[in-house]
Image (spheres, helix red, strand yellow):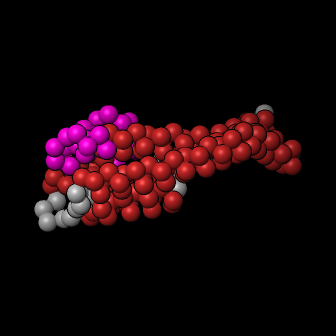
Amino acid sequence: MIKLVGAAFILFASTAAGFLTAKRYADRPRQIRQLRSALSLLQTEITFGSRRLDRVCSDIAHREPGPIGSLFGRAGTYMERLDGASTFECWQQAVLEVWPHTVLKDPEKQVLIDFGKTLGISDRDDQLQNLRRVQKALEKEETDARDEQSRYEHMCRSLGVLGGALIVILIY
C-alpha cells in the first residue's frame, strides 16, 4: 500500500512539473500580447492625450491584468511618489521588481528597459517612433514565443507524465 501511494505521489509530482513547465510556454506569448496592448494604450494616450505619464500608467494598470498591469501600476506609483527620480529610474525599478512574476525572457526585459531610457524625455514624435520600434521588437519576440510554444508545450506535458512513469518503474 505504501509503495502504491509513493508511486502515485511520484507520478503526480512529475506530471505537475511537466504541466507547469508547459504553462510557462503557453503564458509567454499571452503576456507579450498583453504588453503590446498596454503599449498601444500608451501610444494612443501620447498621440491624443495630454495627461501626466504617472496617471496614464495607473490607468493602463487598471485595464491590464496580472504582472503586466502591475508593471505599469508600479511605474505610475514610482513616478508619482519618488521625488527626484527620473522617469527611467522609476520605469527600470518597476521592470526589475515585477520581472520575477512574469514568464517573459531577457530579450523582452532588455526591450522594456531600453524603452524606459527615452520615456518621457523627448517630444511626442520621438516617443511615438520609439513605441513603434518597441512594438516591432515585441512582435518578433511574440512570434518566437509562439514557435517555442508549439514546439515544447506538448513535449513538456508528455515528458512530465512519462518521466514520472519511468521513475516509478525504475524504483519498483
Looking at the figure, which quarter contains the N terminus? top right
Give the x, y percent position of residue 169: 86, 44
Residue ID at (45%, 62%) = 110
Residue ID at (66%, 47%) = 148
Looking at the figure, which quarter contains the C terminus? top right
Residue 37 visible: yes
Task: Please indicate whether residue 159 sits to the left or right of residue 57 in the image.
Answer: right
Task: Please indicate whether residue 8 sits to the left or right of residue 89 in the image.
Answer: right
Is 112 magenta? The answer is no
Q: Quadrant of residue 28?
A: top right
Image: 103 above or below 3: below
Residue ID at (66%, 45%) = 147
Task: Please indicate whether residue 106 sits to the left or right of residue 53 in the image.
Answer: right
Give the x, y percent position of residue 10: 72, 43
Q: Which residues are magenta?
A: 43-71
Magenta: main secondary structure: helix
Among all residues in the image, which is located at the extreme left? Answer: 83
Relative to the observer, which residue lies in front, 63 or 4? 63
Give the x, y percent position of residue 101: 44, 49
Residue ID at (54%, 42%) = 29
Residue 160 visible: no
- Number of marks: 0
Give the x, y percent position of residue 112: 40, 57
Is 58 magenta? The answer is yes
Q: Quadrant of residue 38?
A: top left
Relative to the observer, which residue lies in front, 17 or 41? 41
